[in-house]
Image (cartoon, rainbow, N blue to C red):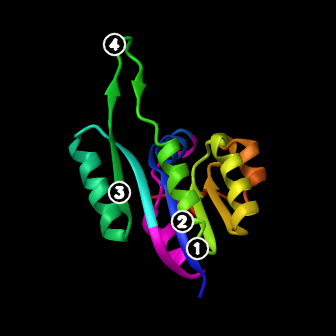
């Protein structure tokens, strides 16, 4: 049976599905689809912790589905900008997981992950699958993925 690891860039998926469709992503449906392909041995959701009640309910729902939720504090800078980036953490976790799984599933539209996918494919001969909102996903990421699946109606709440 194929071993699968899922990595979700929660902020990226939240904002891209909201901006493109005005709706939220359906993580339960994603889990159902991915589990048909093999055994999910790891599933991480990377999020920013604002201490917000709605966010906490959402994070609880992710845990109930089967995700480990990794949180970073939300940082508001004095100039009004905000910081809450998980790219390095996601990269480290994917590089480690790629040694032990057959398929890495990434939920993100962030082009910064293109080199990562190329590297794990070359070094570990692991399959890569990316889910993202096509119009808001970097072409470099789409091209680096072994397979790209556009988030559409079937994956929205």
* Mark in front: 1 vs 4: 1
- Residue depicted at 62% across the width and 49% down the height: 133
Q: Which residue is mark 2?
A: 97
Of the image marks 4 and 2, the number of the one nearer the N terminus: 4
Mark 3 is surrounded, within 10 Å at the Cα level, by few (under 14), some (14 to 19) or many (20 or more) other residues, namely: some
CA distance separating discs 1 and 2: 6 Å
* Residue assigned mark 1: 101
Q: Are marks 4 and 2 in contact (CB under 8 Å)?
A: no
Q: Is residue 77 above or below residue 151?
A: above
Compared to 27, does 76 lie above or below?
above
Q: Residues within 10 Å of mark 4 (few under 14, many from 20)?
A: few
Pointer 3 or 2: first along the chain: 3
From the image, state whether disc 4 or disc 2 is nearer to you.
2
Quarter where residue 126 is shown = bottom right
Secondary structure, mark 2, is helix
- The magenta region covers 20-42
């Amino acid at each position: 049976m194929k071993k699968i690891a899922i990595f979700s860039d929660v902020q990226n998926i939240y904002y891209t599905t909201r901006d493109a469709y005005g709706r939220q992503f359906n993580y339960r449906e994603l889990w159902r689809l991915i589990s048909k392909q093999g055994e999910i041995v790891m599933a991480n959701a990377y999020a920013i912790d604002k201490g917000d009640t709605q966010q906490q309910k959402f994070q609880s729902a992710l845990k109930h589905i089967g995700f480990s939720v990794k949180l970073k504090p939300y940082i508001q800078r004095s100039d009004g900008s905000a910081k809450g980036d998980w790219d390095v953490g996601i990269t480290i976790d994917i590089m480690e997981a790629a040694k032990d799984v057959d398929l890495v599933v990434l939920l993100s539209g962030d082009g910064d992950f293109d080199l990562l996918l190329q590297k794990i494919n070359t070094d570990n001969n692991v399959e890569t699958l990316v889910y993202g909102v096509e119009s808001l996903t970097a072409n470099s990421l789409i091209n680096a993925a072994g397979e790209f699946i556009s988030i559409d109606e079937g994956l929205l709440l």
